[in-house]
Image: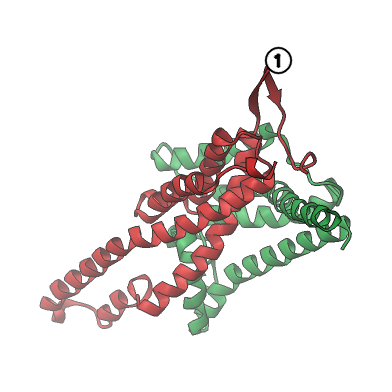
């Protein structure tokens, strides 16, 4: 029975990579945490599809956690060039404005240098560490929801196709 | 530890977790108004999970909360759902809610998000907060069922290993 537990790596990789890419690209990332929950759901869908047994809610949680970790790493890598681009954009703006220094209100340089554009390696790493933790929790949630939506499977037996209801773990060994 | 105690333990951890989570979101603007460096830390922690666009955030103390109104609604809904969980489900064997329930509560938030994204209409932050909360309130019923089921399964396995 133990050998029949579903393989989680591929479903987690597909769900996590999809969520990571979508949450890392500016403008598309406006759906916030919903992409990560969606990634967990996608992973649960593939898990359910590939699994010989109907996966449990716990299986969904685990595959969702893995998907969340992968999403955090992929999202971080995807967002790196975009943050570099935005920094370049701000620097270019400041250079242009500096030509009209006398016409600008005092403190305009501070206006651009403050806030979201201030980045450093330490802050980026803090963001990555916390996003791994947060994305894991959100991915687990997505995985569990995914199992509730896609967990019902049809199993081929000698007597024909049998509907197997969602397994919430009560029938586990 | 008995099964019921385990479920109560998992529930308590979830409740404490979401309380800390919402506390940090609300604390960020206050700390920012005090020019504390901790404010930046909190905004950084929440940045990967939310766009934090100021116009889409509810403001307090003159500064935006650490997440947008929709995310705030989801987390506030999650907190409310966690509070109501023992009254509705109790601490017996965990079971997932019916799939149609999540589809039903997803309709308002999905319609609002799609309408805003396509520029058909522009919702106020309070509408975003309410649709987010409607969705979030159902989430602990999935989260707690899934996590509890996993730990109970581990428990059963370790018992059967000890018996054999």
Question: Residue reaching furthest top?
Answer: A159
Quadrant for the N terminus of chain B, please: bottom right
Q: Is residue B132 visible?
A: no
Q: Position of residue A8 (x, y in %)?
A: 55, 47
Report the front residue among A96 and B152.
B152
Residue A107 is left or right of residue A50, and the answer is left
Dot 1 falls on which chain? A
| Circle 1 SS class | loop
- The scheme the figure's colours follow is by chain
Q: Position of residue B6 (x, y in %)?
A: 82, 60
Q: Position of residue A91 (x, y in %)?
A: 20, 73
**Compared to B129, does A54 lie above or below?**
above
Report the front residue among B12 and B95.
B95
Report the front residue among A42 and B163.
B163
Q: Is residue B12 visible?
A: yes
Colour in which chain B is drawn: green
Task: Please name the residue shown 69% across and 20% down the image.
Answer: A162
Colour in which chain A is drawn: red
Q: Position of residue B162 (x, y in %)?
A: 83, 58
Task: Please name the residue shown 68% across and 42% down the image.
Answer: A56
Task: Please name the residue shown 46% across and 60% down the image.
Answer: A72
Report the front residue among A43 and B59.
A43
Task: Please name the residue shown 54% across and 79% down the image.
Answer: B31
Callout 1: 10 Å neighbours few (<14), some, many (20+)? few
Residue, disc 1: A159
Question: Residue reaching furthest front?
Answer: B164
**Compared to A145, does B126 lie above or below?**
below
């Amino acid at each position: 029975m133990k050998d029949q537990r579903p393989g989680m790596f591929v479903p987690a990789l597909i769900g996590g990579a999809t969520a990571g890419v979508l949450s890392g690209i500016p403008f598309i990332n406006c759906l916030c945490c919903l992409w990560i929950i969606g990634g967990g759901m996608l992973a649960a869908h593939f898990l359910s599809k590939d699994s010989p047994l109907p996966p449990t809610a716990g299986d969904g949680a685990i595959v969702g956690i893995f998907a969340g970790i992968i999403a955090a790493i992929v999202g971080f890598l995807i967002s790196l060039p975009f943050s570099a681009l935005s920094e370049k954009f701000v620097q270019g703006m400041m250079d242009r404005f500096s030509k009209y220094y006398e016409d600008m209100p005092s403190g305009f340089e501070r206006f651009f240098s403050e806030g979201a554009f201030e980045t450093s390696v330490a802050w980026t790493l803090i963001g990555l560490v916390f996003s791994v933790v947060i994305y894991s929790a959100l991915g687990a949630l997505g995985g569990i929801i995914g199992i509730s939506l896609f967990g019902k499977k049809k199993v081929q037996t000698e007597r024909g196709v049998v509907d197997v209801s969602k397994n919430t773990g009560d029938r586990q060994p | 530890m008995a099964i019921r105690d385990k479920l109560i333990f998992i529930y308590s951890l979830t409740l404490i977790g979401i309380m800390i989570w919402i506390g940090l979101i609300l604390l960020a603007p206050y700390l920012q108004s005090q020019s504390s460096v901790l404010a930046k830390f909190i905004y950084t922690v929440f940045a990967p999970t939310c766009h934090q666009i100021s116009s889409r955030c509810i403001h307090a103390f003159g500064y935006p909360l650490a997440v947008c109104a929709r995310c705030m609604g989801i987390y506030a809904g999650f907190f409310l759902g966690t509070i109501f969980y023992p009254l509705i489900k109790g601490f017996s064997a965990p079971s997932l809610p019916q799939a149609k329930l999540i589809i039903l509560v997803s309709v308002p938030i999905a319609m609002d998000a799609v309408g805003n994204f396509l520029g058909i209409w522009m919702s106020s932050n309070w509408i975003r907060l309410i649709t987010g909360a409607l969705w979030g309130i159902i989430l602990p019923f999935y989260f707690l069922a899934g996590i509890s089921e996993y730990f109970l399964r581990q428990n059963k396995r370790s018992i059967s290993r000890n018996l054999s």
